[in-house]
Structure formats: C-alpha cells, structure tokens
Image (cartoon, helix red, strand yellow):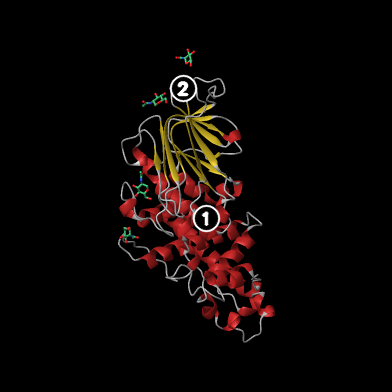
Amino acid sequence: MVHHHRHHPQQQRSKYDEEAAEALAYMDCANLCKKSRPRFLRILFIFSMVSCSLVFAPRLFSHGALPFLYSFSEEDLDDGFSATRTSLNMCSSIKNGTICCNRSSIRSDICFMKGDIRTSSFSSSIILYSGENSSSIVEEEHRIRPYTRKWEPHVMKTIDEISLIKTGEGSVESSKLSCEIEHRVPLIVFSTGGYTGNVYHEFNDGIFPLYITAQKFKGEVVVAMVEYHDWWIMKYGDILSKITNYPAIDFSGDRRTHCFPEAIVGLQIHDELTVNSTFMEDHKSIADFRALLDQAMKMGLKYFGYKILARESSLYNEYERESPVLKDPDSITRKGWEETKRVYLDGQNVRLEMQRFRKRLLKAYTHAVARRKRRGSRER
Ligand SMILES: *[C@@H]1O[C@H](CO)[C@@H](O)[C@H](O)[C@H]1NC(C)=O
Ligand SMILES: *[C@@H]1O[C@H](CO)[C@@H](O)[C@H](O)[C@H]1NC(C)=O
Ligand SMILES: *[C@@H]1O[C@H](CO)[C@@H](O)[C@H](O)[C@H]1NC(C)=O
Ligand SMILES: *[C@@H]1O[C@H](CO)[C@@H](O)[C@H](O)[C@H]1NC(C)=O
C-alpha cells in the first residue's frame, strides 16, 4: 500500500482507516525491530490474523470489515447523565466543587470534577472536597470504569471501577487526605486494560480517545492509568510525550495522594479510529493527530501487509481442504461477527513461515534504514 503524505480534513473514512492502519503497522515494526518484548509475537499474530490474512477481512479497516466494531446492543445504552449543582448543561464546564458524569454515549462514560481533588488509590477513589462542613461522610458518589467499550459488558467487567466521591470536611471519617504531590494542571484517568495488547485496540480504545480528550490542554495535563503496564509506556511513551508534559501515573500502583484542581475520568471517543473535528473544541482533525504521530515517531509511517497462506493457519489441519472456512472465508463472515470470531479469532492459531515473513521484515528494515540515512544526510 502506498503511503500518503498529504491529508485533508474532508477525506473519506477509508483514508483515515488507511492512515490508522499504517500507524498500527508501524507499531508492530517497532515491536519487532526493538525486540524489546517477547510479547511481540503474540501481538503480531493477533494483528496478522485480524488484518492481513488468509481469511476474512478483505483489508483491515476497510468498509464493513471487523463487524464487531459496530455491534452495539440496545440494552447496553444508558442515556441518562447526572449533573449536580450546575446550571450549565455541559459537563466539561462545570462549577468549582462539582462532579458531573456524562453517560449519554454508547461507547464510554466520562466524568468531570473540579475543585479540591485528591486521589486515594488504595480505595480506588478520587475525592472532591466540597469545603462544606457537612456531617455526612459522602455527599455524592459516582462510579465509573474508564474504558471506551461500554457496550461490551464482559470486557468492562475487567476494568477497575473508580469511585468519585464528593465529601465535606466536617466528619472524622472523612478526615482530609494530605497532598503528597500537588499538581497545578488537570488529571485525566483512563484504562490501559481491556483489549490492550492488541494493537488495533491500543489505538482505537486508548490512543485516539486520549488524544481527543487531552489535546486541548496542549500538554498541560497529567495522565493516570488503571491497569497500568510498563510495556505500554515503553511502547507509547513517544506519543504520550506529545500529549502530556508530565510523567504518567500508575493509578493503582502509586499509593501517594496526588492533588489536582480538575479531573476527567474516562475518555471521549468519536467513532472507530476517528477524530471528528466537529466535536473537537479546537477543531483538531485526524490530520492533526496524524501529524502528532509523525512527530512522535520521527522513524515516518509505512504499511507493509502480510497475507498468511492457508497452510500457516491451524485451521488448515482442522478442516477439509475444500471447506468454505479455507476456500471461501467471505461465506463465513457473511454469517456475522459471532461466527467470524468463533472460527477465525477464537478457533485459529497462526504459525508464520519465517522464510516468507522474513521478506517482509527485510523490506521494513530496509525501509527504516534508508529513511534514517536520508534523514541523517539531510541533517548533516
Ligand atoms: C455528553 O456527551 C455528548 C457526546 O457524547 C455531548 O453531545 C453532550 O453535550 C454531553 N453532555 C453534557 C452534559 O456534557
Ligand atoms: C475551588 O474549590 C476548592 C475547594 O473545594 C478551593 O480550595 C479552591 O480555592 C476553589 N478554586 C477556585 C478557583 O475557586
Ligand atoms: C462543623 O460542624 C460541627 C457540627 O456539625 C461543628 O462542631 C464544627 O465546629 C463545624 N466546623 C466548622 C469549621 O465550622
Ligand atoms: C463528524 O460528525 C458529523 C455529525 O455526526 C458527521 O456528519 C460527519 O460525517 C463526521 N465526520 C467525520 C469525518 O467522521
């Protein structure tokens, strides 16, 4: 696939998808090239299965591929939102001393807090001191799982739930936590759990929404993760450093009390692999996001596809050679996501033939080296 250098905000979806796919391909290469983690093969396998392959998706992220992305079910919708003591109807512009949760999106909940905010990770909570001398311990409590796949209850169950508590200062039980680290900028909390480990999801469920939620702060924001992984920081540190000027916090692992004037728990998400400028406060678009990735990764993005052959799949030995599973994957994917997932994701292992795969690796490596040389000679 050719690599596009020019970007227009008005481009069609498929172009965004291509760019996103390139970004993902890059990440896989980064994994391989650095040989930093044994996990890379697994990621690569998943990625190969989903993207390149054999079987079902004609092209990763092309229209209609990966039907699970659109599998919302009505009963998962929760269209109420709770705002407290605020006459403004936008959660993002609440008054000091308030918490406002917006649960109207089918993809993610997001809560905003403003005032005297202190983290209490041992109790998985974030406390807002209202400054009122109330005798009640808790004036208000909101619970949220800060992950962007709200419509998938089974994965949401694996995400840590955080309690957002508004409390007075009068009672003994709520004796105020003392600040160990005082921050002057807002906090954003999100999860790097769930499907993190699969590159598609790392971007779709994490990096895109983080950009959407955080970029308006222009780096003046602290991020904290639940289900924190060091490897995630290694892998995405360069991108993260374009989004925040401060070190990331392991929300559950860091037991110190961090204090903030403002907090956002959960992330905003627009659509699959989308930054829709209509909904961005400063009208940033996918092109701006792409530019950020380019800056963060210097190494430029290029997509190298790898199609596995039937014989690289475990399904090869499980099904008749003439089976539609091997011969006509489209006929399986037409049966819907459940069937596709059962056959090709849950039921399949992929064993790459290194002789074949080597060619792709060489190509990627040569590309990376050539790029570096070109850059080097330009800089000299
Ligand atoms: C809640 O979020 C939606 C977007 O998901 C937005 O349109 C709406 O204005 C928000 N409501 C509040 C109260 O912030
Ligand atoms: C916001 O409220 C907190 C107490 O809840 C107070 O300490 C702080 O000074 C207030 N900030 C502003 C800007 O009013
Ligand atoms: C808070 O209220 C308690 C009684 O509920 C009272 O004894 C105490 O003096 C009050 N503290 C302040 C700072 O007003
Ligand atoms: C952005 O959202 C608006 C309103 O939902 C929609 O009409 C438009 O097509 C979206 N644009 C992109 C680039 O997705």
The residue at 33%/51% (across/down) is: 279
Ligand 2 is found in the corner quadrant, namely top left
Which x, y percent locates residue 96? 37, 30
Check disc 1 and report the residue beneath it: 202
Query: How many numbered discs?
Result: 2
Q: Is mark 1 on a helix, strand or loop?
A: helix
Check disc 2 and report the residue beneath it: 134
Residue 163 visible (yes or no) = yes
> Residue at the right extreme?
317
Question: Would residue 62 appear left or right of 93 to someone viewing this image?
Answer: right
Q: Is residue 376 above or below residue 219?
A: below
Amino acid type assigned to the residue bearing label 1 in the image: Glu
CA distance for labels 1 and 2: 43 Å
Asked which quadrant contains residue 1, the reply is: bottom left
Residue 126, numbered circle: none
Q: In this view, does 110 lie above or below 132?
A: below
Work out whether residue 195 or residue 355 is closer to the camera in this orientation and state it. Answer: 195
Asked which quadrant contains residue 362, the reply is: bottom right
Number of residues whose C-alpha sits closer than 10 Å to that of mark 1, classed few (under 14), some (14–19) or many (20 or more): some
Which x, y percent locates residue 54? 57, 76
The residue at 57%/48% (across/down) is: 159
Q: Do the residues labelled 1 and 2 touch (CB within 8 Å)?
A: no
